[in-house]
Image (cartoon, helix red, strand yellow):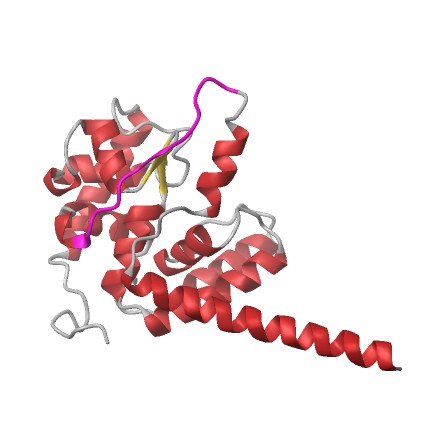
Amino acid sequence: MKFIKRFFRFVFKTLFWLFVFSIVVVVIFKWTPVPITPLMAIRNIEQSNTSKNGWEHDWVPLEEVSINIQLAVICSEDQLFLSHNGFDIKAIEKAYENNKKGKQLKGASTISQQTAKNVFLWPDRSWLRKGLETYFTFLIELIWSKERIMEVYLNSIEMGPGIYGIEAASQYWFKKSAADLTKYEAAAIASILPNPLRYKANPATSYIQGRKSWIVKQMSYFGALKYPNRDKKND
């Protein structure tokens, strides 16, 4: 009986401190750059037996990132990003219906969910990982601003072979700073995000050219990018 009590006490304390730790990490990353993500480490291990090893990752503040790429990823990945609370309910319902029909899941993850997954978790499709993704998405939506979520997203996601973040991607694909990306260059990078190890932003295939044109058209429909509470300090 004492063993059982000690076991449950141990489990409770472990879960409690993991909960506290998760909040502390999210608060820290509200202000500081994310130096490394689990995916970077995993990819590096996978490439340890190949000629390519390591990664390119140059953190830049959102003010030094072209508004074109910010708008391009919103139009490509999550057009309700500025208004939802981290989850696109309609997209989730559609994905659920497609899953019941045996179709491939598409478009269910928001930018907030992708950020939570990339920064805090490992690439997997298990229910555990999905549950943790939901938890961390809730946390970052609660603690971070939309601008901060976008900043972390653009600085953390995979955008090519060993390429992480928009600055490294801009230099890799177009030999220029992220601040100088044109609409079509931004759309080209956004168009490869579903599978950045398979697709190339430059030179673009006919498929990527088609996606580029669609994204640019969506950008014109979307209009000016205005973050909520932009003039308020994050406190």
- Residue 93: tell me if it is visible: no
Q: Residue furthest top?
A: 51
Q: Residue furthest right?
A: 1
In depth, the one of 148 and 7 nearer the eye is 7
* Residue 220 image position (x, y, % from top left): 13, 50
In depth, the one of 67 and 118 nearer the eye is 118
The dominant secondary structure in magenta is: loop
- In what quadrant of the picture does the N terminus appear? bottom right
Relative to 96, does residue 233 appear above or below in the rendering? below
* Residue 121 image position (x, y, % from top left): 50, 53
Q: Is residue 189 left or right of residue 45?
A: left
Relative to 151, does residue 216 appear above or below in the rendering? above
In depth, the one of 178 and 69 nearer the eye is 178
Residue in the picture at 58% in, 50% down:
125
Q: Quadrant of residue 167?
A: top left
228 magenta-colored: no
Q: Quadrant of residue 184?
A: top left
Relative to 144, does residue 74 appear above or below in the rendering? above
- In what quadrant of the picture does the C terminus appear? bottom left
Relative to 23, does residue 74 appear above or below in the rendering? above
Highlighted range, magenta: 50-62
